[in-house]
Each structure stands twice: as C-alpha cells, then as structure tokens.
Image (cartoon, rainbow, N blue to C red):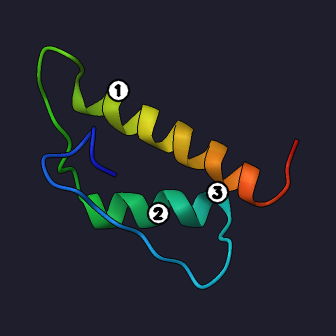
Amino acid sequence: MTASTPKPYQFRFDALSSADELTARIDSTIDGDWFDDIHGLPAWRRAMTLHFAHEILAELGGAP
C-alpha cells in the first residue's frame, strides 16, 4: 500500500485470509498512519484501501 500512507507497506500471506483477518492485519500494521490532506481524510483513505483490498481478496479467491 502506498497511495494512502506516507510510506509503503507490503503485506505477505501464506494463504488467503478472510476479509475480517485482512482488515485486522491492515489496521494493526498501518496503525492510523494514513495521509491527511486536501485529497482525503484518513477515514476516507482507510475505507477506500479496505474496499480495494477486499476486492482483490475476492478476485484471488475466485469470487465473481
């Protein structure tokens, strides 16, 4: 993750996780370190990051 945070974060998993596990991992790793600027508030950046992460998870898991 790079666009929503001041520094890049890389996530590695041994297997596909659940959506809840993915959310918890993102939240615990980033720990509130979201950009806060005129292009978006931290809450919006977190919400969009989680949205796209869950979309990617669904695609990797074969969901339609």
Which residue, given by chain and number where applicable, does mark 2 sit on?
24
Tell me the kind of residue under disc 1. Trp
Placement of the C terminus among the 4 image quadrants: top right
Seen from the viewer's position, the closer of residues 43 and 13 is 13
Sequence order check: which comes first, mark 3 or mark 2?
3
Sequence order check: which comes first, mark 3 or mark 1?
3
Q: Is residue 42 left or right of residue 20?
A: left
Work out whether 30 lies above or below 36: below
Work out whether 19 lies above or below 43: below
Seen from the viewer's position, the closer of residues 35 and 20 is 35
Label 1 secondary element: helix
Tell me the kind of residue under disc 2. Ala
Seen from the viewer's position, the closer of residues 7 and 30 is 7
Query: What residue appears at the point 54 percent right and 48 percent down from the top-left corner?
Result: 53
Which residue, given by chain and number where applicable, does mark 3 sit on?
19
Which quadrant of the figure has residue 19? bottom right
Mark 3–mark 1 distance (CA, rounded to whole Å): 18 Å
Query: What residue appears at the point 46 percent right and 63 percent down from the top-left corner?
Result: 24
Residue placed furthest toward the top: 38
Near mark 3 (Cα within 10 A), the count class, few <14, some 14-19 or many ≥20, is: some
Query: What residue appears at the point 54 percent right and 39 percent down from the top-left corner?
Result: 52
Seen from the viewer's position, the closer of residues 15 and 29 is 15
Count of labels in the image: 3
Which residue, given by chain and number where applicable, does mark 1 sit on?
44
Relative image position of residue 38 (x, y in whole percent): 13, 14
